[in-house]
Image (cartoon, rainbow, N blue to C red):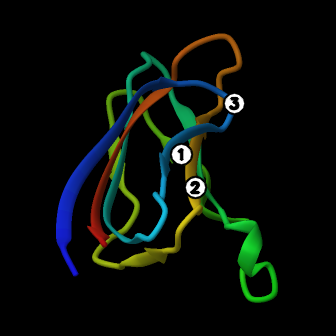
Amino acid sequence: MANTFKLKTKAGIDASLVTVYTVPSSTTTVIIGLTIANIKGASVTADVKVISDTVDTETNADVYIAKDIPLPAGSSVEVMAGNKIILQTGDIVKAGGSNSSGADADIILSIMEIT
């Protein structure tokens, strides 16, 4: 089994939940870091959600990692704070902000893929 560290980023997220990362087939992924930075001149909020693979709906559901997390102007937040989240093949990490008319935040996702 190979362990590969990767960085996934998404710039200028707005109010719609956009895909930041999808776990490839035959892969288990560990989220080891998740930072959201406010790129707007005013306070905003942000959401991060895991969309669970539909194959394992008995034990997994779509859940928020962060919901309406406040981001003052010019700030960033490390959501994981030393925790780890395990993702299975097909799971998706999505993020969104509070502004429907423009970019709110950038997101940085540090992961380790196990193949």
Disc 2/disc 3 C-alpha distance (Å): 15 Å
Which callout, 1 or 3, points at the residue further toward the start of the chain?
3
Question: Which quadrant of the figure has residue 49?
Answer: bottom right
105 versus 7 height, above or below:
above
For the point 68% across and 67% down, the residue is 53
- Label 1 with label 3: CB-CB less than 8 Å: no
Disc 2/disc 1 C-alpha distance (Å): 23 Å
Which callout, 2 or 1, points at the residue further toward the start of the chain?
1
| Residue under numbered circle 2 | 92
In the picture provided, is 69 more to the left or to the right than 33? right
Residue 62 % position (x, y): 73, 66
Element type at marker 3? loop
9 versus 48 height, above or below:
above
- Label 2 with label 1: CB-CB less than 8 Å: no
Residue 113 % position (x, y): 30, 67
67 versus 63 height, above or below:
above
Residue 24 % position (x, y): 46, 58
Residue 61 shows in this picture: no
* Disc 3 packing (10 Å; few <14; some 14–19; many ≥20): some
Foreground tag (2 vs 3) = 2
Amino acid carrying mark 2 in the image: Ile
Q: Which mark, residue 106?
A: none
Residue 81 % position (x, y): 32, 71
Q: Which mark, residue 70?
A: 1
Amino acid carrying mark 1 in the image: Pro
For the point 49% across and 21% down, the residue is 42
Amino acid carrying mark 3 in the image: Ser
| Residue under numbered circle 3 | 16
